[in-house]
Image (cartoon, rainbow, N blue to C red):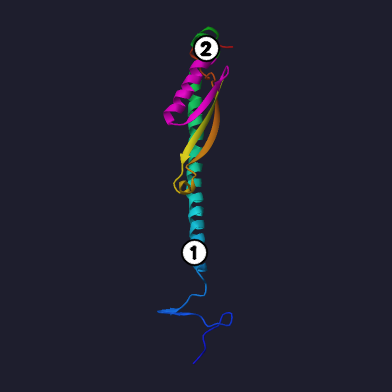
Amino acid sequence: MTQPLRRNGQAPAIRRGGWKAADGGQTTAFVVVVIAGLFLFAGLVLDGGLALAGKVAAADDAQEAARAATQQLDLNQLRSSQRVRLDRHRAVAAALDYIKATGDTGHAEATRDTATVFVTHRQRTQILSLIGIDHLVTTAHASARAEQGINAPWLQGTRP
């Protein structure tokens, strides 16, 4: 009959049901760490993808808000001089209204013919919330410029 393996000169203890495990729970700790790492990696992949989608949504919202702002023309200026100029207060208000309707936050600026919009989008996390990261914040900005069309009704029939 073969002798059991000895550790430090002593025979391993025998329990009812088999030999005492020689790893002392190291395998369990390893499995726990590996599974935690896999969950963290899955969280980074899933929530990172959601953050990227949030960045795209923020960029879309910024572009649309800038376009909404550039529709707010100073009509008196347009009619008197045939030059396009934004009504700055109405342009900023239109951009902020659009941003508010999307559920994002941000601010807008308007110059004579350009509106610039900055949007901040907060994306809720799915898995990373388990470790205390509840939101990922993405930002985007866009500008739109009000321009006069090629065929202006007040210039029809005239030649330069």
Counting labels gives 2
Marks 2 and 1, the one that precedes in the sequence: 1
Could you say which disc has been placed on residue 21 in the image?
none
* Above or below: residue 130 compared with residue 30: above
Magenta range is 84-113
Q: CA distance from mark 2 to mark 1?
A: 77 Å
Give percent across and percent down for residue 86: 53, 16
Q: Secondary structure at mark 1?
A: helix
Please tell me whether residue 11 belongs to the stretch shown in magenta: no
Location of residue 40 with respect to 53 vertically, above or below: below
Comparing 14 with 63, the one in front is: 14
Task: Say which residue label 2 marks.
Answer: 155
Residue extending farthest to the left is 17
Q: Is residue 155 above or below residue 46?
A: above
Q: Residue drawn at (48%, 24%), measured in percent from left and top?
A: 96
Residue 84 in picture, x, y percent from top left: 54, 15
How packed mark 1 is, by other alpha carbons closer than 10 Å (few <14, some 14-19, many 20 or more), is: few
Mark 1 belongs to which amino acid? Val
Identified by mark 2, the residue type is Leu
Q: Residue at x 45, y 23 (%)?
A: 97
Residue 129, image x and y in percent?
46, 46
Residue 130, horizontal then vertical, whole percent: 46, 49
As drawn, the residue found furthest toward the bottom would be: 1
- Is residue 86 highlighted in magenta? yes
- The residue mark sitting in front, 2 or 1, is 1
For the residue labelled by badge 2, is the local secondary structure a helix, a strand or a loop? helix
Question: Which residue does the numbered mark 1 point to in the structure image?
Answer: 31
Q: Quadrant of the C terminus?
A: top right
